[in-house]
Amino acid sequence: MTAASYVPVRPRAVAEMVLGFGPRKACSTSERVLIVEDDHDTRLALEIRLIANNYDVAAAVDGARAAYLLRELLPDLVVLDLGLPGLDGFAFLDLARSMPPAERPKILIHSAWEREEHERRALALGASLYLQKPANDLDLLVAIRNLLDQR
């Protein structure tokens, strides 16, 4: 594929085309989810699924961008991979923990890292839930909905 023929993937357009719904004028929910995932395919699939379920979605590919978006967007929930370039997921958790409680989002860890050791550390740093990759779509969506309902 040449650079001239490359068209960037737009998750909202893909969700509209594949899942059969038209463009939305406004998000039907005010719930904002920040996806922090360095794997392109995983991030894109999750973005499409959340957009299709009427969440307001932002995404970051690394911890530094995620830290910026955390402060700028004040998301209700963060879906966080632990193995990120630069600022890793644990450093991100520490940063989120320093936020005022009213602004602090729920954080769902979605990681392929070995569960037992990393889950304990993530929960101690303020994560709300740890889901091992690969988690099926339904389990992930239910976990997101449950965490948002707790806010």
Image (cartoon, grey):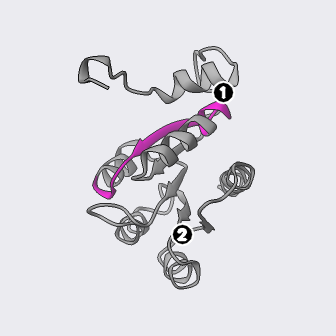
Residue 120, percent from left and from top: 55, 83
Assign the C terminus to one quadrant of the image: bottom right
Residue ID for mark 1: 28
Q: Name the kind of residue labelled 1 in the image.
A: Ser
- Above or below for 143 versus 18: below
The span shown in magenta is 50-64
Residue 48, percent from left and from top: 58, 35
Q: Name the kind of residue labelled 2 in the image.
A: Ala
Task: Give the secondary structure at mark 2.
Answer: loop
Q: Does residue 147 appear to the left or right of 56 in the view shown? A: right
Q: Residue at x 39, y 51 (%)?
A: 70
Dot label at residue 73: none
Q: Does residue 65 appear to the left or right of 53 in the view shown? A: left
Query: Which residue extends farthest front?
Result: 1
Is tag 2's residue or tag 1's residue first in the polypeptide sequence? 1
Residue 12, percent from left and from top: 53, 25
Assess whether residue 57 is covered by the magenta stretch.
yes
- Above or below for 119 versus 65: below
Task: Give the secondary structure at mark 1.
Answer: loop
Question: Quadrant of the rendered structure where residue 58 is?
Answer: top left
Q: Residue at x 66, y 27 (%)?
A: 28
For marks 2 and 1, give the CA distance.
27 Å
Which is more toward the observer, 59 or 98?
A: 59
Dot 2 crowding, Cα within 10 Å, few <14, some 14–19, many 20+: many
Q: Are the residues tagged 2 and 1 within 8 Å (C-beta)?
A: no
Residue 23, percent from left and from top: 59, 15
Assess whether residue 42 is covered by the magenta stretch.
no
Dot label at residue 127: 2
Q: Residue at x 41, y 63 (%)?
A: 96
Assign the N terminus to one quadrant of the image: top left
Which is more toward the observer, 49 or 98?
A: 49
